[in-house]
Amino acid sequence: MIRFYIALWAAKLSQFLLRLLGRKGTYFAGKLAIKLCPDFIGRIGRPKTLIGVTGTNGKTTVSNMLNDVFASWGIELMNNRYGSNVDAGVASALIESAGICGKCKKDIGVLEIDERSARLIYPYLKPDYLLITNLFRDSMRRNAHPQYIADILTKHIPKESKLILNADDLISSSVAPSNDRCYFGISRLPNEPDARENIVQDVRICPVCAQRLVFDFRRYNHIGKAHCPDCGFSSPTPNYLLDSIDFDGAKMRVKESGETNEYKLTANAVYNIYNSLSVIALLREMGYSSEKIASAFDSLKVVQSRFWEEEINGKPLTVIMAKGLNAVACTRSFDYVSTEPGTKSVVLMLDDVFDEKESSENIAWLYDADFEFLRDPSITQIVTVGVRSLDSKVRLLIAGVDESKIVAVTDEKEAASKVDIEGADKIFLLYELYRYDSAVAVRNQIAQRMKEVL
Amino acid sequence: MVIEYLYPEIANLFGDSANFKYLRQSLPEAEFVETALNDVPAFAQRKVDLIYMGPMSENHQILALTKLRPYRDKLAELIENGTHFLMTGNSFEIFGHYIENDGLKTDGLDILDFHSVTDIGHRYNGFFLGERNGVKITAFNSRFSHSYPDGNCSGFAKVLRGHGINKEHGFEGITKNNFVGTYLLGPLLVLNPLYTKGLLEKLGANTKPAFFEASMDAYKRRLDEFEDKERNLD
Ligand SMILES: [Zn+2]
């Protein structure tokens, strides 16, 4: 017990000092506390109700949305919004909300939790509700394959946690099968094709009998509705089914246990609409009325998918965050760019920042991403930028892009000068998350040229 | 020429299907067959020139092994006769004596003289630089398992940087006649145009791999990085 208090006070002191220095050292305090007291997370006070948010994509969006909803109700949460989502970040958030005796001063907590940290967090801290957004193929180094992550979750999720799961994702919806659970899902929308073909499709066979699954509808990758023709296995039935979207009126309709409710549409892209829907499902499970949730949604801002568009002398220049090393996220951006109306020139800055200087980059992920979308005839030029520009060029050739459309540039400084400003109706720049600063620099040089040329 | 991809629905974890696609583009005259788990493989019914399989999750690896077990003798005969096999990632482990995972031993096809051990607690990631018949091989590793020769096994490539089939061994992969089993994963053939050129020649195709010049440019740059001692490739 003494150990715990020493850890708590040392961590609190470090938080205080770091704040004096103007640093947001939210990771450090938790790391220190766990070092001094290994089961610190289990000893420190927790809020009465604890919500965990995990999954490959959308954790941050969902956590932020929950914070905004509760804020609109005047409830301040314990959260790790500005911190990290591994054990030390979780500990820091708990320390932040704890009084000097270690009691939590907040009633409700929302923690974004890294999937692989399950082993270090759940033995000590048992969320009452655990929302899993989805599980996709991710970094091969850290995440191996999605079944590996699903197995980690199944092994460590506390049996008392109620799960909020994506019915359209057969990987994440199958974790911890004995836990109490509910599902959310989105029906096929009028403008959606039967099946979008993607290279990454991690659920192709029946988990029961290994027969090839039949997808009644596939939205993208393994997201959709499937059944096994042999043994009767099928995707779970959603308790919260979004069955219609009115994009013009910015409304979505959700069927929930016999009743039908309308909510403001707070995102435009389907993968973000899943996030909004999961928030509704969670709040309904917690007992909040649909009226109360709907009024909170009315005050939410629409989620723009890390997107920045500006028209320069009549021509749009759009910057999109694409997340390098993450084939699924890149594919979403390629798909989006290819279906935009008009002809396009596309600049790709997808190299990993950390690998390029001291190591090299494992480029296998390029072959999981659907560069095939960029073969669309509306794309008239593709400029690949960075040390891996030659690898991206080969990837584009294998995807069927004509060599005459591809320009490979190693030096970022030369990228803007290669962009065909006049030839295309629109210019897109796709950048890897951690390359933001250099992407902005290239973007500004392109903008400058557009001002001169157009 | 017939090229068969075994179990593409599960044996494609890290961009590996690119190997098959690249062969398809390099050999426009050849016939390409994709065999699903519940299909009878083409190699069991007619002459196949090259059989490809890629890495799988641990459960799926055992499933593939179960599906191939009825064809064990046929596969042994094909390896003996010099049919080409390219088994990347953990797929080649199926051909050894056994695969051990968390104390549980699963009998392999018992055709080649080695065994494998999977340790889910420890993932090994790294870059690989090696040499095969004077050709430099550049590739990636990402795996939970290692293999151990039980007798005289020949390797796929001499290790210059990175790990071989296990941490101590100086060779990567297991070969016999024209069977190549290697942990190197991802688009191995695209990453190594010179090796692929040699493979196409051995298959009797007098042609360069698709997009040869562009892939050579990328290969040379990668090779420069992999040979640079200042870089950390572990
Ligand atoms: Zn079945």
Image (cartoon, coloured by chain):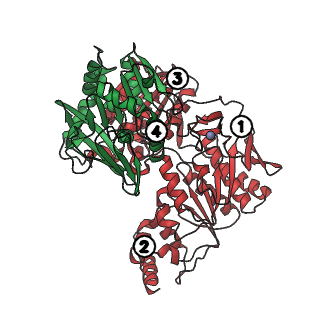
As drawn, is A376 to the left or to the right of B161? right
Per the rendering, the colour in which chain A appears is: red
| Outermost residue, right side | A258
Is residue A126 or residue B6 the one in the foreground? B6
As drawn, is B107 to the left or to the right of A311? left
Look at the numbered disc 4 and give the secondary structure of its residue.
Answer: helix
Spatial separation of the CA atoms under disc 1 and disc 3? 25 Å
Asked whether the residues under the numbered discs 2 and 3 touch, taking CB atoms below 8 Å apart as contact, a structural biologist would say no
Residue at the spot 58% in from the left edge and 52% down from the top edge: A61
Residue mark closest to the camera, 3 vs 4: 4
The answer to whether any part of residue A451 appears in the image is no
Say if disc 2 is inside 8 Å of ligand 1: no
Q: Which chain is green?
A: B
A349 lies above or below B46: below
Spatial separation of the CA atoms under disc 1 and disc 4? 45 Å
Image coordinates for residue A104, horizontal then vertical, percent: 58, 76
Residue at the spot 38% in from the left edge and 43% down from the top edge: B108
Q: Earlier in the sequence, mark 1 or mark 3?
A: 1
Look at the numbered disc 2 and give the secondary structure of its residue.
Answer: helix
Crowd around label 1: few <14 · some 14–19 · many ≥20 (10 Å): few
Q: For mark 3, what is the residue?
A: A425
Say if disc 4 is inside 8 Å of ligand 1: no
Residue mark closest to the camera, 2 vs 4: 4
Q: For mark 1, what is the residue?
A: A247
Look at the numbered disc 1 and give the secondary structure of its residue.
Answer: loop
Crowd around label 2: few <14 · some 14–19 · many ≥20 (10 Å): many
Residue at the spot 37% in from the left edge and 36% down from the top edge: B186
Q: For mark 4, what is the residue?
A: B64
**Chain letter for mark 1:** A
